[in-house]
Amino acid sequence: MTYIEKARLRAAELIKRGSALILAVESSCDETAVAIVRDGRELLANEISSQIDIHALYGGVVPEIASRMHVEALSVLYERALEKAGISKTDIDAVAVTFGPGLVGALLTGVSFAKALAYGLDVPLVPVNHIEGHVSANFIAYPELEPPFVCLVASGGHSHIVNVTRYGSYELIGRTVDDAAGEAFDKVARVLDIPYPGGPLLDKLAETGDPEKYRFPSAHTPGRYDFSFSGLKTAVINQAHSIRQAGGTIDAADWAASFRKAVVDALLGKAFAAVRDTGAKRFALAGGVASNLLLRREAEKRAAREGVEVFIPPAKLCTDNAAMIGAAGFYRLMNGEIADLDLNAEPSVKLIEE
Ligand code: KG4
Ligand code: ZN
């Protein structure tokens, strides 16, 4: 029997059982991660190795370095995850892996590792879209959460409002028409001399600033559910340069707070328009930007006002991790969506066709 024939038989057994212990791998950008997740909900191990310190030396992610560091970290994290979960490799029912979107070389390291493992153990290989992973972090944080719900996914490369209609089924409601929210945070942080990665540090600085001090253009667009961060970002950067060129200084904390407020207002203004129009009863946050302190506080407030239930995973599950890949992988596996050993990385794959 070939690998895929055996994997299909195993997958059929797991679907019948409705249960699976999944080892998940994530390597799409600058975090290497391995997690072990039972039935898409229960986290047995969540190992993450961040490369941020190295990339900070260069002011951003260097793809070649990222790939090399993933290769070094993967087997160490794998061993550690098994140990933390208290299981042996033969207990693993399936291997889930991020196949895109992300940096191609970085993705390939995880995909190759996952393939070798799935082949060696004769278990199904489940390809997972990274953005779907972010959404699925909510299933780990909230074991009782079930679709349908509206989710705002904001990361370094993506900003979407999606309607999660069923497990693995998404309708695109809105999106950024240019930069992603995280990208805007990182670029504005540079102007304030905040080191890479700018988003989290800008957020911390903003906590001490006055958000009403500076007025920036809105990040709203004519589209009812779309946002645009490019104009806001450019205006914020240009204004800082002009003030400095004229010999003035800017208060970095107030600047950060005013910019952060503009981004959060746009994200939540559009997301809650979607919640109202769809009549959704539940609203979730996902992606690295969902660890933003103001976004989290404001989402809670707005949800309470609108009478919808709100789901906000802990920061560790919002930024890149493999637990979320294990959660998404479980539902893909239950749908019988497994891959053969010719699975490739797809750096620009979309969650929903636009
Ligand atoms: O989801 P993620 O970890 O990786 C991608 O898939 O892109 O998101 C990373 C992005 C970065 O742009 C980072 O600056 C931003 O999320 N980010 C934040 C915060 N924490 C991470 N942005 C604003 N406030 C934060 N607290
Ligand atoms: Zn991500």
Image (cartoon, rainbow, N blue to C red):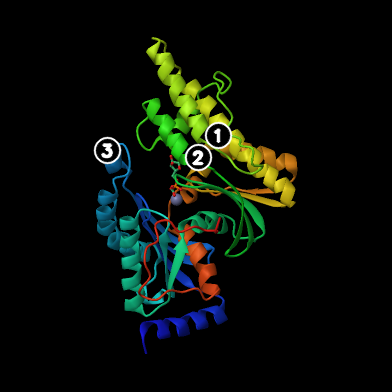
Q: Identify the residue under disc 1.
A: 263
Quarter containing the C terminus: bottom right
Residues under numbered marks 1 and 2 in contact, where contact means CB atoms less than 8 Å apart: yes
Ligand 1 within 8 angstroms of badge 2 C-beta: yes
- Observer-nearest of 6 and 239: 239
Residue at coordinates 48% horizontally, 79% vertically from top-left? 11
Residue at coordinates 35% horizontally, 59% vertically from top-left? 107
Q: Earlier in the sequence, mark 3 or mark 1?
A: 3
Location of residue 249 (image quadrant): top left
On the picture, is 115 further left or further right than 334? left
Q: Identify the residue under disc 3.
A: 58
Q: Which mark is residue 181?
A: 2
Q: Earlier in the sequence, mark 2 or mark 3?
A: 3
Q: Residues within 10 Å of mark 1 (few under 14, many from 20)?
A: many
Distance from the alpha carbon under mark 3 to that under mark 1: 26 Å
Q: Amino acid at mark 2?
A: Ala
